[in-house]
Image: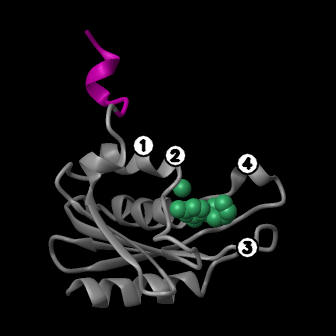
Amino acid sequence: MNTDQLIKEAKAARELAYVPYSKFKVGAALLTKEGKVYRGCNIENAAYSMCNCAERTALFKAYSEGDKQYEAIAVVADTKRPVPPCGACRQVISELCPSDMKVILTNLNGNIEELTVAKLLPGAFSPEDLHE
Ligand SMILES: O=c1ccn([C@H]2C[C@H](O)[C@@H](CO)O2)c(=O)[nH]1
Ligand SMILES: [Zn+2]
């Protein structure tokens, strides 16, 4: 699975977004080391703080199925610049994904920004910080 294909998966995921409040659809596609793709969309709620982002939907789907080895994640939205993941997603991705994992941010215009998990959240709070 190449970058273009993973972006297509993220776009397909985006179509299923449940966004009655923001009307802002986001899609994510997480590729595992074994070549499986987990799709995620954002899912909102009338209690706004319960909204879940596309990135975390995809990652939680994979992790909860026991798939814990990841190769790349692609994220897409209808933004001017490649969609930037929110702070909460950066924190969760930093903990569950390898620091050298590829992060592919894009938009519907085809702008693409590729970076690594390490670049997503410098100085992330990590499990090692919990204990002396
Ligand atoms: O990277 C992002 C940024 C925002 N959202 C969602 C959260 C909310 O449903 C809507 C507006 O913030 O977009 C995502 O899913 N991923
Ligand atoms: Zn987020």
Query: Can residue 22 be seen from the camera position used here?
Result: yes
Please tell me whether mark 4 sits on a helix, a strand or a loop.
helix
Asked if the residue at label 2 sits under 8 Å from ligand 2, the reply is yes
- Inter-mark Cα distance, 3 to 4: 13 Å
Q: Looking at the image, what colour scheme do you see?
A: one colour
Quarter in which the N terminus is drawn: bottom left
- For disc 2, the neighbor class at 10 Å (few under 14, some 14 to 19, many from 20) is few
Q: Which amino acid does label 2 sit on?
A: Ala
Please tell me whether mark 2 sits on a helix, a strand or a loop.
helix
Q: Mark 3 points at which residue?
A: 19
Q: Is residue 20 found left or right of 74 in the rendered image?
A: right
Q: Is residue 65 magenta?
A: no
Residue stretch in magenta: 124-132
Whichever of labels 1 and 3 marks the residue nearer the N terminus, that label is 3
In front of the other: 11 or 96? 11
Image location (x, y in percent) of residue 61: 43, 66
Badge 2 vs badge 4, beta-carbon distance below 8 Å:
no
Q: What residue type is labelled 1?
A: Gln
Q: Mark 1 points at which residue?
A: 91
Question: Considering only vertical position in the picture, is 78 above or below 113?
Answer: below
Asked if the residue at label 3 sits under 8 Å from ligand 1, the reply is yes
Whichever of labels 3 and 4 marks the residue nearer the N terminus, that label is 3
Q: Is residue 127 magenta?
A: yes
Whichever of labels 1 and 4 marks the residue nearer the N terminus, that label is 4
Q: Which amino acid does label 4 sit on?
A: Ser
- Inter-mark Cα distance, 1 to 3: 23 Å
Query: Can residue 53 be seen from the camera position used here?
Result: no
In front of the other: 78 or 127? 78
- Inter-mark Cα distance, 1 to 4: 17 Å
Task: Tell me which residue sits at (19%, 80%) in the image.
Answer: 35
Q: Name the residue under label 4.
A: 49
